[in-house]
Amino acid sequence: MIILNGIKSEKTSKLESLGCFCFVVRDDACKVDVKRDVEALFGVSVRRVNLCKFSTKAKKKYTKNGVMYTRCACLKKAFVYLRKDSDLINFNKLLE
């Protein structure tokens, strides 16, 4: 399965009114794989898919033992735009 989970935030709620849904996908996913997976999983027709890859970020924590340097995980997001005649996506299907 290419889709790991859905993203729900204020920004994605505004995009949902335009028919765009946001998902976290695997790093090796391409647009065709994401489109095929969304259509099979949710039963909707996809108009287009945009992918964004976020690189790792260095984080610094100040603790009583000194400064600790860590890294955040790499993340790839898919923005899926649906056709106007298709239904909205229910994120509860991802939990099944």
Image (tube, helix red, strand yellow):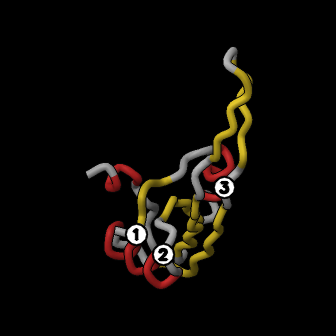
Vertical arrangement, residue 6 with respect to residue 69, above or below: below
Crowding at dot 2, Cα within 10 Å, few <14 / some 14-19 / many 20+, comes out as some
Give the structural element (helix, strand or loop) at label 3: loop
Give the structural element (helix, strand or loop) at label 1: loop
Give the structural element (helix, strand or loop) at label 2: loop
Disc 2 to disc 3, C-alpha distance: 18 Å
Task: Give the image location of residue 45, x and y in percent.
Answer: 44, 78
Are discs 2 and 1 less than 8 Å apart at CB?
A: yes
Residue depth check, mark 2 versus mark 3: number of the one nearer the observer: 3
Q: Quadrant of residue 86?
A: bottom left
Indicate left or right for 94 with 13 as reference.
left
Which dot marks residue 29?
A: 2
Name which of mark 2 and mark 1 comes first in the sequence. Answer: 1
Residue depth check, mark 1 versus mark 3: number of the one nearer the observer: 3
Name which of mark 1 and mark 3 comes first in the sequence. Answer: 1
Vertical arrangement, residue 3 with respect to residue 71, above or below: below
Which dot marks residue 56?
A: 3
Indicate left or right for 53 with 43 as reference.
right
Indicate left or right for 95 with 84 as reference.
left
Placement of the N terminus among the 4 image quadrants: bottom left
Vertical arrangement, residue 6 with respect to residue 81, above or below: above
To which residue does mark 1 refer? 2
Question: Disc 1 residue type?
Answer: Ile
Task: Give the image location of residue 16, x and y in percent.
Answer: 59, 57
